[in-house]
Image (cartoon, coloured by chain):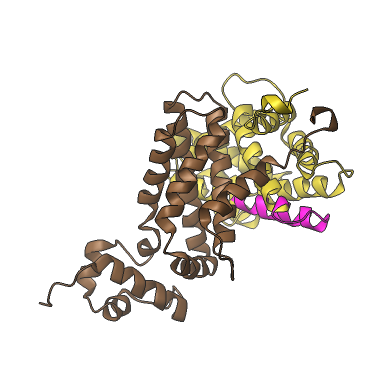
Chain colours: A brown, B yellow
Amino acid sequence: MGRWKPNAPGRLATAALELYSERGFEQTTVAEIAKRAGLTERTFFRHYADKREVLFAGAPAMRELFVQAVSDAPRSAAPVDLLVAGFDAVSEMFADRREAARQRQSVITANAHLQERELIKLAKLSAALAEALRRRGVAEPTATLTAEAGVVVFKVGFARWIAPGEEREMAQLLRETLGELKALWPRAASERM
Amino acid sequence: MGRWKPNAPGRLATAALELYSERGFEQTTVAEIAKRAGLTERTFFRHYADKREVLFAGAPAMRELFVQAVSDAPRSAAPVDLLVAGFDAVSEMFADRREAARQRQSVITANAHLQERELIKLAKLSAALAEALRRRGVAEPTATLTAEAGVVVFKVGFARWIAPGEEREMAQLLRETLGELKALWPRAASERM
């Protein structure tokens, strides 16, 4: 029986990310993760179903935070502007985790199954956002299109945030990316002032 | 040795869709599909790796058609308008297949693994479109955002095309959906004429 160690899930996640980065995801065992974290395999399985789960354990909390911010945002002219509230909330959650996010992304990029799981995570986020928008009275197809646009911006903006050498804040990059999505439709000359 | 039967892949696909709809995807065997099509299991495996493959065999051709149309489209004011050429090409490919598409969608909606595979298909389409746009000289992040917007519109517009009772053409629904995505950003009063 070991002494009680605080923050077991966080320490296991840190150990797992280190090992996945050093040796590859496939080559790492739960026993090695537990050992690196100074914990037992039994403790690992108390917190995570398997070694893949370590990489996606934060997804439900992120989704809830995003959805809650969109649900609570003040009424605005366009539903798409509600997304900014969600972007800001998520950016705050990730503020101190840019290096961990870079490590995680490298692991996922190297493994097709993890990439699939990442796609499912984003599809769930989109469905939850669309549902939150409908609850606010946004009609279809606007609710689904706004949610899908939000996920596209999050995906592209997040990739920029973790790009090598990037130092700007995630909230800023997500707002810029949202502006760039809007700018795909240039104003016709007749529409300009 | 059976006589040679024309269009074996098409007949196997039709038989598979019927059986997946009647009995469920999980409950259907390759032997049953071959029998329903009047062919052998051996013939099945000459055309499809497994019973899942039947549902996704058309994806590479659809992707190539879409990408080719975008690559060949005349230069336009905005890269996002290039998507319409792709939408029109794909709509033509699907023209006679609305009922089959409805059947296929019901099968996929009922099975989480098939849904994942569908997400992968769409992610590949997005990556191929972004690459085609970059080859045309479209810079990042515009290329990726345009491709992602195209896939969102395709996904939402396709879902409308196969909705019960819908009779409008896919090309029309995709154009409308593209217009609705653009309309997420209403013009400010100061920007209107």
Q: Residue furthest right?
A: B74
* Residue B49 sits in quarter: bottom right
* Residue B169 sits in quarter: top right
Q: Is residue A35 above or below residue B101?
A: below
Q: Residue sitting at 49 percent across and 47 percent down?
A: A87
How far across and down, in percent of the image, does residue B95 sit? 73, 31
Q: Which residues are magenta?
A: B121-142
Residue B118 visible in the snapshot: no
- In the image: residue B52, left or right of residue B76: left
How far across and down, in percent of the image, does residue B76 sit? 86, 41
How far across and down, in percent of the image, does residue A22 sit? 45, 81
Q: Residue sitting at 61 percent across and 38 percent down?
A: B155
Q: Residue furthest left?
A: A1
Question: Residue B129: within the magenta?
Answer: yes
Judge by depth and name the residue closer to the eye, A135 or B28. A135
Judge by depth and name the residue closer to the eye, A84 or B178. A84
Q: Residue sitting at 57 percent across and 29 percent down?
A: A78
Magenta segment, prevailing SS (helix, strand or loop): helix
Q: Residue sitting at 43 percent across and 47 percent down?
A: A89
Quarter of the image that includes the C terminus of chain B: top right
How far across and down, in percent of the image, does residue B103 sit? 56, 33
Mark count: 0
Q: Is residue B122 above or below residue A44?
A: above
Judge by depth and name the residue closer to the eye, A110 or A129. A129
- In the image: residue B78, left or right of residue A90: right
* Residue A42 sits in quarter: bottom left
Question: Residue A86: within the magenta?
Answer: no
Residue A100 visible in the snapshot: yes
